[in-house]
């Protein structure tokens, strides 16, 4: 709702002034934007917010996203589907289904909350975009169809968004299969992803997460890859992880400092081919983990 209010406000202020044809209905009904804007119009609005946030510190100079031409988009239906890094679904109302910005320099750029207006989005990659910063918008965690979220190798910071207190566990990243936030500056507790039964690749390594590994991580039945290395984790490694029968690779080492050993149940992880716990204080089975 907040995003929609902001949308109305920006339109009224004339941020998108040239977009009169496509967005005129919005200007006329700023109080009921969601009822009036078509899904494609909302996608376009969200992309305009995305562009201005990603380029917030370098807007005037940057050649990044130069082909994201908001003016042309406002008068050519679905023109935004041709923007670099954008994929639309040709069969279903030309909704934006994937964004892949890999290696685009976005110094000081941030991700806007309005990104969640892209409610058909299935894959979001903004990776290795030198010095993308700021927090991860909490609104990402409720995007209904988001299956793949890859924000690796950036400078995102602050706590990882947690679910709203009243939300059902299943409403938190409801469709997530791949989460890669490797190598950012997230801190605080690990995200409460235990309810994410579809998740198969989870990489939270190379951040500043603290506290212990949640017991509930043993509920992520589909997990094949779990990277928690190079954080500031502590406590016991929960024996519940031995329930992850599909797990092939688990990385726990570097900078983390766990107590105790690895529970013998880990021997039951038939699929496991790589257990890496180099220099994280653990003893017990294994111990011969390879370095990544
Ligand atoms: C824009 O470019 C000029 C000249 O290259 C540079 O001095 C200035 O700092 C740049 N501004 C930003 C916001 O990057
Ligand atoms: C996308 O670009 C192609 C080639 O430049 C053009 O033919 C097509 O009309 C464009 N599509 C839209 C929706 O603007
Ligand atoms: C994103 O683009 C990069 C190259 O620019 C490619 O290597 C990568 O596979 C793409 N990822 C997705 C999810 O499409
Ligand atoms: C995340 O994106 C980067 C850059 O496109 C890529 O190298 C990496 O493999 C991706 N991670 C996953 C899990 O696909």
Image (spheres, helix red, strand yellow):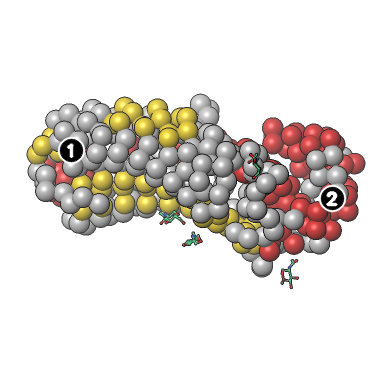
Residue 159 in sight from this viewpoint: yes
Q: Is residue 19 left or right of residue 224?
A: right
Query: What is the x, y in percent for residue 228?
Result: 31, 41
Give me the C-alpha separation between circle 1 and circle 2. 56 Å
Please give the residue where the numbered disc 2 appears in the rendered image: 19
Q: Which residue appears at 79% of the width and 48% of the height?
A: 37
Nearer to the camera, 261 or 242? 261
| Image quarter hosting the N terminus | top right
Name the mark on residue 279.
Answer: 1
| In the image, residue 88 above or below residue 50 | below
Secondary structure category for the residue under label 1 = loop
Label 2, residues with CA under 10 Å away: few <14, some 14-19, many ≥20: some
- In the picture as drawn, the residue positioned furthest to the left comes out as 284
- Do callouts 1 and 2 mark residues in contact (Cβ within 8 Å)? no
Q: Which residue appears at 88% of the width and 53% of the height?
A: 21
Q: Which residue appears at 33% of the width and 28% of the height?
A: 210
Nearer to the camera, 173 or 243? 173
Query: What is the x, y in percent for residue 108?
Result: 57, 38
Label 1, residues with CA under 10 Å away: few <14, some 14-19, many ≥20: some
Earlier-in-chain disc, 1 versus 2: 2
Q: Is residue 118 left or right of residue 148?
A: right
Q: Which residue appears at 53% of the width and 37% of the height?
A: 133
């Amino acid at each position: 709702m907040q995003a929609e209010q902001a949308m109305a406000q920006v339109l009224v202020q004339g941020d998108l002034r040239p977009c009169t044809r496509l967005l005129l209905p919005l200007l006329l009904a700023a109080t009921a934007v969601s009822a009036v804007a078509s899904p494609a119009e909302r996608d376009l609005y969200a992309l305009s917010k995305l562009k201005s946030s990603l380029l917030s510190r370098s807007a005037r100079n940057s050649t990044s996203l130069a082909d994201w031409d908001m003016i042309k988009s406002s008068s050519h239906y679905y023109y935004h589907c041709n923007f670099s890094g954008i994929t639309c679904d040709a069969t279903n109302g030309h909704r934006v289904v994937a964004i892949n910005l890999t290696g685009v320099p976005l110094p000081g750029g941030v991700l806007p909350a309005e990104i969640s207006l892209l409610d058909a989005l299935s894959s979001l990659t903004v990776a290795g975009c030198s010095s993308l910063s700021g927090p991860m918008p909490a609104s990402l965690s409720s995007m209904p169809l988001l299956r793949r979220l890859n924000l690796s190798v950036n400078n995102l910071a602050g706590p990882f968004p947690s679910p709203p207190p009243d939300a059902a566990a299943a409403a938190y990243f409801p469709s997530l299969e791949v989460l890669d936030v490797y190598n950012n500056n997230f801190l605080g507790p690990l995200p409460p992803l235990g309810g994410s039964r579809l998740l198969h690749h989870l990489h939270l390594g190379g951040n500043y997460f603290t506290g212990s590994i949640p017991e509930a991580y043993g509920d992520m039945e589909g997990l094949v890859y779990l990277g928690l290395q190079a954080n500031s984790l502590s406590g016991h490694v929960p024996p519940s992880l031995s329930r992850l029968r599909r797990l092939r690779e688990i990385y726990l080492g570097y900078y983390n400092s766990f107590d105790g050993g690895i529970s013998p149940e880990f021997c039951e992880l038939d699929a496991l081919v790589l257990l890496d716990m180099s220099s994280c204080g653990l003893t017990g089975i294994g111990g011969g983990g390879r370095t990544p």
